[in-house]
Image (tube, helix red, strand yellow):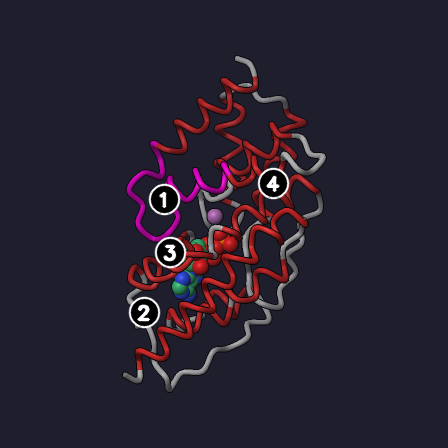
Amino acid sequence: MNEQEIILAIAQEVRAKMEGESSGHDWWHVYRVWRMAKRIGAEEKVEMFVVELAALLHDIADWKFHNGDDTVGPRVAREMLERHAVPEEVITRVCAIISEVSFKGAGAAEKPSTLAGMVVQDADRLDALGAIGIARAFAYGGHKNRVMHDPAIPPATHRTKEEYQKNQSTTINHFYEKLLLLKDRLNTATARSIAEDKHAFLEDFLARFLCEWEG
Ligand code: ADP
Ligand code: NI
């Protein structure tokens, strides 16, 4: 199989595994991150084979759904890549990216060590902004039985991964605790420029939501 065929085979397998997941980590999230990673990657000097594979596999076993165990993702990904005879040198890089991309709280260390990782992380973060980002936040909140909004609960700043994981806050607070912070945490200029308008849309949405809340 050539690289393109491997990418499509992995995409198919990821799709079969993630289709129907409703917490915001469904196949279509992966599909959008994959497309966005290609768009950002085209502007950066980066190996697209690694970027595409890492984008496709970045949420294959998210730590939030494995009692905080963030070693499951890279393990599942490695198994899949080995089965498709991907070279070890590529597997190592893809797995390193998977363990580096996930957001672990406002103050936790998080910058990937390679440009390919930065591209995938940016693509993932952009999917938490804009209209789709808003839809995903409420889908996730519903999945976790969170209330949409409670004016009595102020947003918090999570300094560590543990604090962020324990978080039980409202979905509106999630905008202040994560979504509005993302535009200043992007790694590439391409992603920063794509984020501008998506960020503005979040701010408009919040203003309107809070205004409607008080009638
Ligand atoms: P990442 O892809 O950076 O790991 P997450 O897995 O934390 O992002 O989140 C997946 C989606 O669910 C994102 O759109 C995110 O905004 C949303 N989400 C995560 N935590 C919450 C929360 N506490 N309330 C509402 N939405 C959330
Ligand atoms: Ni993701």
> Which kind of residue does numbered mark 2 sit on?
Arg
Distance (Cα) linking label 1 and label 2? 19 Å
The residue at 40%/83% (across/down) is 153
Mark 3 vs mark 1: give the one in front: 3
Of 132 and 102, nearer the camera is: 132
Mark 2 vs mark 3: give the one in front: 3
Nearest to N terminus: mark 2 or mark 3: 3
Q: Are marks 2 and 3 in contact (CB under 8 Å)?
A: no
The residue at 58%/43% (across/down) is 120
Distance (Cα) linking label 4 and label 2? 33 Å
Highlighted range, magenta: 16-35
Distance (Cα) linking label 4 and label 3? 22 Å
Q: Which mark is residue 136?
A: 3
Dominant SS in magenta: helix
Of 159 and 11, nearer the camera is: 11
Ligand 1 has an atom within 8 Å of the beta carbon of the residue at disc 2: yes
Of 140 and 185, nearer the camera is: 185
